[in-house]
Amino acid sequence: MIANILYRFVGNRLSPAGPQARLSILIYHRVLAERDPIFPNEPTVATFNAQLGRLKQVFTVLPLSEAVTHLKTGTLPARAACITFDDGYADNLTLATPILKKHGLHATFFIATAYLDGGRMFNDTVIEAIRRSSLHTLNLDDLGLGQFDIAGVEAKALAIGHLLPQVKYLPVAQRESTVARIAELAACGALPDDLMLTTQQLQQLHAAGMEIGGHTALHPILAKLDAEAARKEIAAGKDYLENALGNRVRLFAYPNGKPGVDYLPEQAAIVRALGFDAAVSTQWGAANQTSDVFQLPRFTPWAASRYRFVPQLLQNLRYKYTATIPQAG
């Protein structure tokens, strides 16, 4: 396609091979069998398949560990890109991995280990409780969260979008009790317990040739924890994965991942001290050879239109985030 020739030309200018190369790291969470009306921008199997097809026509897609090595040595190929997933959803294995393998591509999966084997992340408790509720109004006054219209898909999406930013920054114990109470007040009935990977599925994902990275155990906001608590959370996830997989876990993703808000340079220093090789944030932008490999930016491919997917990635190449580099110690 003429468009792909143009895209590669632009990509070569923005990210040439060698020391001036830029590294694009894509971030996903889930791939769904069909469109979710509450989250219409979450990629479906069809969307993800189309995105990977376009990605490999324009970018040189590498495993993240390999890309990090090339980034440090100034030997990245032109238009280098990596694919990552956060949290550890079961559809990462059942739906995303077959598509990755179909295209001959590799991804790194960052796992919040406390939710494996039937667990459910706090955000999914909120999402699924509101999705399943037959109430017209959800009264959360006793939690200090107010009242929400949840009569219809659009109202449910707005309520979820309002609640999740408030809930995620609570201390972990309070966060869990709060979302449990939201589910109770939503009168939603039983919630799903199969959203996340089992340990066996995690091992299958690894056996399929995908890299597994750390993402803490309970997915806390690390910036809210003291140094010892942060270290325990990061180490607990790493230890579980290494025991389950029988190999060293080299990569880490900060939960939520916004620099200066969700994690601080102090936590980046802990990640480095625990023996990881690199870590990723959720700050948009593309890395270059001067970037801190313990705070690599990532980009969410959010465009609904298939015609905007590659242009957005090329636009993201123009932005370099300069992280505050933690001091050794």
Image: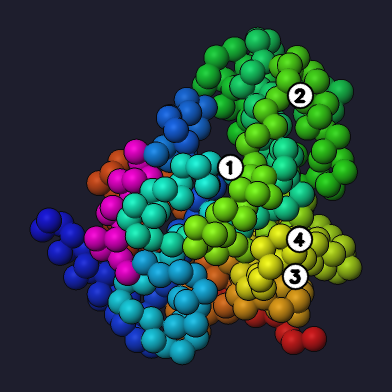
Quick check: 11 left or right of 313?
left
Residue 55 is one of the magenta-drawn residues: yes
Q: Which residues are magenta?
A: 46-60
Picture residue at 26% right of the left edge, 63% below the top: 58
**Residue type at mark 3?**
Gln
**Residue type at mark 2?**
Ala
Residue 47 is one of the magenta-drawn residues: yes
Q: Secondary structure at mark 3?
A: helix
Residue, disc 1: 90
Q: Secondary structure at mark 2?
A: helix
Label the magenta part by its dominant secondary structure.
helix
CA separation in Å, label 1 and label 3: 28 Å
Picture residue at 71% right of the left edge, 46% below the top: 116
**Residue type at mark 4?**
Tyr
Picture residue at 80% right of the left edge, 20% below the top: 184
Residue, disc 2: 183
